[in-house]
Image (cartoon, grey):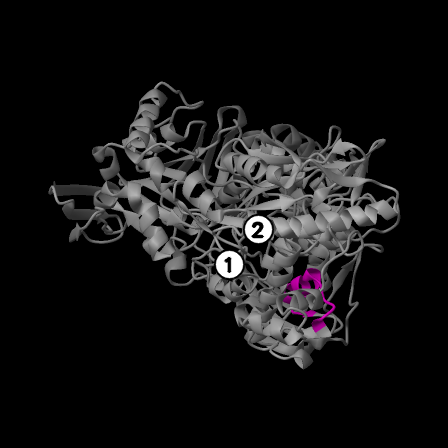
Amino acid sequence: MYKLMLPCLVADHITEGRQCNMSRKIFSLFIMGLMLFSLAVTPAVKPVAAAGNDEVLKTVIYSSQGAIFMGVWNPSSSGYSDTYSRRIADLVFDSGFPYGVEGVPVPYHCRVVEYKQDVTVPDDAVIFNSTTKTWQAAHAGETAKTYVRIECDRPYFHDGHKLSAADVMYSLAWEWEWIHLDGDDDPYYDESEADWMSDFMDTILGIKLVEQTDDRMVFDVYHNYYFPPSEIITATYVVPFTGTPWQLWYAMSELVAHNDKYSWSESTETVEQLDQINPNHAEAIKEELIKLKDSKPIPDFLKPYIEDENEAIAVYDKIINFIDEHHHAVIGQGPYYVDEYQPENLYVRLKKFDKWQVPAFAEGKYKVKPYFDTIEVYGLQNQDTAILDVAKGTYDILWYPFPAYKFTGLSQEQKNAIDLYKSTSAFGDLVFNPVHDKDNPYVITVGDKKYFNPFTVRKVRFGIEYLISRAYITQNIFQGSAGPIYTPWVSSETGYQYVQSVVDAFGLSEQPDVEYGKQLVEEGMQEAAEELAKMGYTLEKKNGQWYFEGEPVEIIGLGRVEDERKDVAIYVAHQVLKDLGFKVSADIVDRRTANSMVYTSDPSSYQWNFYTEGWVSSSNVKYSISRIIQYYSSIWFAPGLVGWKWTPENTKRATLKEVLEFLGDGDIQAGLDSLGLDYYTTVDKIQPLLNWTADDFALVIYKGENKGVKMDSEDKYWDFNRLGTAIGIYESYRVFLYENWEFYAVNKRIKLDQNLVDPVAGLASHWAIRSARPATTTTSTTTTTTSQQTTTTTTTTTTTTTTSSATTTTTTTTTTGSTTTTSTTSEGGGGICGPAALIGLAIIPLLLKRRK
C-alpha cells in the first residue's frame, strides 16, 4: 500500500562547505590550492568505465564520514529516512501517483477512474482486524467523506514476477497489524510505526478489489480525508499500490516479530533496524523465506486474493535466487535495480530492469524512459575532488549540491565543461531537547543526578528566535550562499509568501534584537527559579552565571562535522548562549552519531540540549499537509522519533488563545489582525479554536478534520498553517535559521530535460536523473574586460542530443558598474549554467540576495 507520500523532508544532509573569512581573491587561491592538493586523494573505488561511455551514467556524492547511507532500507515508516537512501530508492521503486515538478501528484502507474464525496461504505469494503487476523467490513453503512475508484497497472518486480492485488492487500494488512497493540506481549507491534501511521490508517474505512486482469488492478477506496484546495490530493490520499512483494514483506515481518535482534525502527546495542541492503540482514531474510516456504507460505487472510497458490509459492524461489545473486533483499518495481552495493568502497551500481516499461497512465513529459543501462554512484570524502572530477569528466553528475563559492576555484576550461542546476530545497534550524521529569517541569533526572534543563523554559527558547543573527549565519558562515528563514518554508515555495504575515507579526528579522531576546530569557529563568524554590530547589544567578543546586547550568550543543552546521553550532554556543550566563559547549559529531543521538535515542538520556538540524525536500510541494505536523507538533519529530516527546501529556503546551493575546497585547482581535488571516478574521469565528495547540492544527491539516472542525476551503487551509506556525514560533521547539542556495554540477556530455528539473529540489528529484541523456556539445566563448570594470561575453552553443535536433543559441550580456557579472543560460542547461555564468560565480550569492 502506498499512502500518497508527500515529498519527504529528510534529515539530515545539507550543504558541505566551510566558513572562511578571508578575502575573495585569497579564498579563490586557497580553493585552487585545495583542489591541487586533492589530486593526490584517491577515491575508494575508481570508475570502472571511462566517462564518455554512453551506456553508463556516473554520479558522485559527497560522503565525508565514509558511509553512503545513514538510514536503513525497509518498507516501514522508519526506512529510507536519509537523503541518499531516498534518492537512490526513487530509482528502484515507482509510485502510483508520484509528485510532479509542479508540486502535485500525477498519474503514473495508477489513475483515478471515479471520484465522489460522501458515499456510503458497502458491506464488501474491508479493513484488516489485527486481533482476529481477518478482513472485516467494520465500517459498512457509514458515510465516507471520499470515495475513489483507482485503476493501476501491474509492473514486474525485479525478481521477475508481476505485482498483484495480493501484494497491495498484504501491505495494508501489515500496516494495520504493526500499528495495533493486541495484548501486552504482541510481537507484531512497533511503537514508532504506530506514531507515524495510526492517524493515516484510521482514515481508511474500507477497500475493495473490484477486478484484476493480467495487466490491470481496480480498487474502490473509501476514506475520511478531504483536502479542499486539490481534488487530486484528496483522491490519491490512499493509493492501492506497493513496491515490495508480499512474500518478502511477510518474511521480514516474521523475522522482526520473532527474532529479538531485529526491529523496524529501534537501534540499540543489542537490537538492529532491519536493513534489506545489508548483506547479513539479507541472509537472515532469506533463511526466513526458506522456512516460511516449507511451513506456512501463504497467510490465511491473504488467500482470497491469491489467484494461483502454486505460482505464489514459486515466487519464494525467485526472491531467494535474487538475494543469492545480488547479496541484498531490495526488490522493487522501478526502472533500476541495485546490482551491487559495496559499503566499504562507497559504491552502488544500479542496472536497468529489462522488464520495466513506461507506466500505463503516465502523461506528457512524465512518460520519460531512462536512457542509461547503468547508473553508478560513487562516494567521495573530499568535496573539492568531487567538484573537480565532474568538471574533468571522470564523473557525469555531482549528485550533491554545493554553495556557489565552492566552484570558484575551477579553471575557466573546467567551468566551461559543466552546467549548474540550482536548489533551494535544503534548510536548517535549531531543535531543542526540552525533556523533563513527569513531576517537575524544569528538572530531568539521569541516574542519581538531577539537572536543570534551560530549554524546558518557553521564554528561553523563544528568546533564541531574537538573539540569533541570521544575517551572520548566511553571510559569514555560508559566505552569502544562503538566505534567512523563520518557518519551514523556503523562499521558492508557494507557502513562503502565505506565512510571511506570521513572521511579520512576531517582528522577526535577519538582524537580531538582542535586548528583547535577553529580556525574554531573563524573565523565563527568573520565573523558573521562583517555581523551583517552591519545590525546594535552588536556581540562581551569581556574577552573571546561572547555577542549579550550586553547579553551573550546562548546555551541550551538537553540530555536524561535515558542513557549515559545525560553525552554526559553535556560533550559537559561544556567541549567543554564553552571554546568557550558561556554561556551553558544542560537540561536533558525524551524521551517524547525530542521527542516533537525536532521532533514535530517548531524549531523556539527556545527551544534548540543542542540535543544528538540516532538512532536504525531495521535490516541490504546492500544498503541504505535513509542515506543521513534522516541525511544530509532537506527533512526528518531537524532537526525535522515539522516547520522550513534547506531547501535551508530557509538558505544558501553548494554546492559540495564549499566542493571540501575546500578539495583540491582550486583545485577541488585534492578534488575529496581525496574522493576515483570510477566513478566521473575527473572535466569533476563532472561538472554537482558542484552546487548540499546534498538534490540533497539525491534525486538521493532515487529516482534513479535527475535533469537529473541517478544513473545507483553501482559505481555511492557509489559515490553519498560519495559526499552527504562529504557535510554533511562540513555543520555539525549533528555531528556523537559513535556506541553502546550492548548485548541482553536470558535465556537459550529459543533458537533462529542463522541464523535469524540480524548481525547489533541483536534481534531488528523480525525474531529472531519469531524463538524463548523452549530448555532444561544442562551446566557444569570447570574453573582454575593460579597465572600467565592464565585461562583455558572447557565448555560442551548439547542442546535439538524442531526442532533438541541433540548436544554436547566441547570448551577449554587457554589465557596467562597480561590480562585474555576466550570466547566460545554455540550451538544455540548468537555471544558472554555462561558461559565461561561471565567470561571475563568486558574486552569485550577492546577486541572489538582492533578487530575494
Residue stretch in magenta: 689-705
Marked residue nearer the N-terminal end (2 or 1): 1
Q: Quadrant of residue 386?
A: top left
**Image mark for residue 109:** 1
Of the pair 351 and 142, the residue shown nearer to us: 142
Residue 431 position, x and y percent, is 62, 45
Residue 385 position, x and y percent, is 37, 28
**Position of 264 compared to 68: left or right?**
right
- Residue placed farthest to the front in the image? 543
Residue 99 position, x and y percent, is 49, 58
The secondary element bearing badge 1 is classed as loop
Q: Name the residue under label 2.
A: 515
The secondary element bearing badge 2 is classed as helix
Instruction: Indicate the quadrant containing the C terminus: top left, top right, bottom left or bottom right.
Output: bottom left
Amino acid carrying mark 2 in the image:
Glu
Q: Can residue 627 be seen in this view?
A: yes
**Residue at the spot 73% in from the left edge and 51% down from the top edge:** 646
Amino acid carrying mark 1 in the image:
His
